Amino acid sequence: MDWEGQEQTRLMLWLRGEFNRGTAVGPAHEHAYAVPNGGSRHGLEAAKMKQQGVRSGVSDLVIPIARGGYHGLYLELKATPPRDADLAESQRVWLARMEAAGYCAKLALGIEQAQAVIREYMAAPATETLGELMPMVAGADW
């Protein structure tokens, strides 16, 4: 049974509900995205995904909204205890790396903790950018 996946689905449904109700948490729904790193895959498919940039340990959910001095939120979700799994070393390293890069990086044990993290994060004031943004020349117009 994929307890963690079920809780992540419920978390995303909750975020959509917050968006529909117009709460302070709501804007997270439009920006949040899941990183499909989990699950088991055939060896060839796993190798192809790794070549395309899939990395072990990347957090389950990303909310790229700058709040509280952070650039965004990386949230690693585990199922509610006692159905939770241990935090893998690669996940621990990723959370530390993101924190060092200026992101809020959190572990949540279950949907209630995840909701509390997102509520607290989204309640923080917007992060202000100081100075002008550097213009980028590379890339194509969109």
Image (cartoon, rainbow, N blue to C red):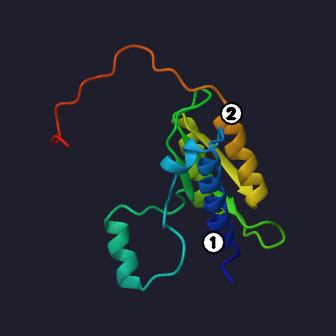
Give the answer, above or below, for where 61 lies relative to 81: above
Name the residue type under label 1. Answer: Gly
Residue 119: quadrant of the picture: top right
Q: Residue at x 60, y 45 (%)?
A: 26
Residue bearing mark 1: 5
Q: Nearer the viewer, residue 105 or 15?
A: 15
The dot on residue 123 is: 2
Give the CA distance from mark 1 to mark 2: 26 Å
* Residue drawn at the location 17% of the way across and 31% of the way down: 137
Quarter of the image with the C terminus in it = top left
Instruction: Name which of mark 1 and mark 2 comes first in the sequence.
Output: 1
Q: Secondary structure at mark 2?
A: helix
To which quarter of the image does residue 100 belong? Answer: top right
Q: Which mark is residue 72?
A: none
Q: Is residue 92 visible?
A: no
Q: Judge from the rendering whether residue 60 lies leftward or rightward of residue 46; answer left or right.
A: right
Mark 1: which secondary structure? helix
Q: Residue 44, percent across and down?
A: 35, 83
Quadrant in the picture for residue 11: bottom right
Q: Residue at 71% of width from left, 53% of height from top?
A: 114
Which amino acid lies under the numbered mark 2 shown in the image of this protein? Answer: Ala
1 vs 2, front mark = 2
